[in-house]
Amino acid sequence: KAAVIRSIVMPGWGQYYLNQPVAARKFFISEVGLVIGMLVSRSLAASRQQDYRSFAAVYAGADFAAKPDIYYVRMGAYDNIHEYNAAMLRNRQLDSVYQPGTGSDWDWTSKEDRLHFKEIRKASNTWAKLSAFLIGGMVLDRVVAGVHVLFLTSTKLETTSTLMPVAGGGQWTLAVAF
């Protein structure tokens, strides 16, 4: 039990506790890689976010004080607030219209600048998604390390397998008990 808890807290620690240094090293290295990757991706996401906000302030006159993410998506899709509002009115999406002069205005100096902004914003989102994916990897690493310790400490491994005919095919069930 102590080894399982150790592996869940820090993958590899439980293996080390059970005198399995090679397995401990593998789990520890994978965890370090996941943590470093997550920290780097978070940092890059924040850096790109600052980049696209600064870029929009300079090249579109945008003010990013307390704006939701959808505002940035809309800025990347339309050259200015008037073009955006006209599209929303045509589509009868009155609740999505921004009131000019209330801090939601933007007007890109060129289409190329808008597209560059859009690329930077998408890069920021990609790095943020990668960070979340790596956090999932850290959780999985802990689960696998904990199961590995259970396997190492198990004196009895029981498996049962059943195959049942079902209309249009079959169903196979495998159960493993430690």
Image: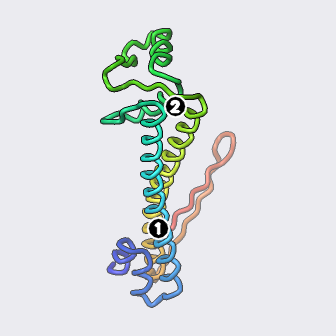
Q: Nearer the viewer, residue 31 or 143?
A: 31
Q: Is residue 82 left or right of residue 110?
A: left
65 over 130 or under it: above or below: above
Taking the view exactly as shown, the residue that stands out farthest to the right is 168
Q: Which label is found at residue 36?
A: 1
Residue that appears at 36% across and 35% down? 64
> Which residue matches tag 2?
76
Q: Nearer the viewer, residue 28 or 109?
A: 109
Whole-Å distance between the Cαs marked 1 and 2? 31 Å
Query: What kind of residue is marked 2?
Result: Gly
Q: Nearer the viewer, residue 135 or 76?
A: 76
1 or 2: tag closer to the N-terminus: 1
Query: What kind of residue is marked 1?
Result: Ile
SS label for mark 1? helix
- Position of the C terminus by quadrant: bottom left
170 over 28 or under it: above or below: above
Q: Which label is found at residue 103?
A: none
Percent across and percent down for residue 127 are 50, 51
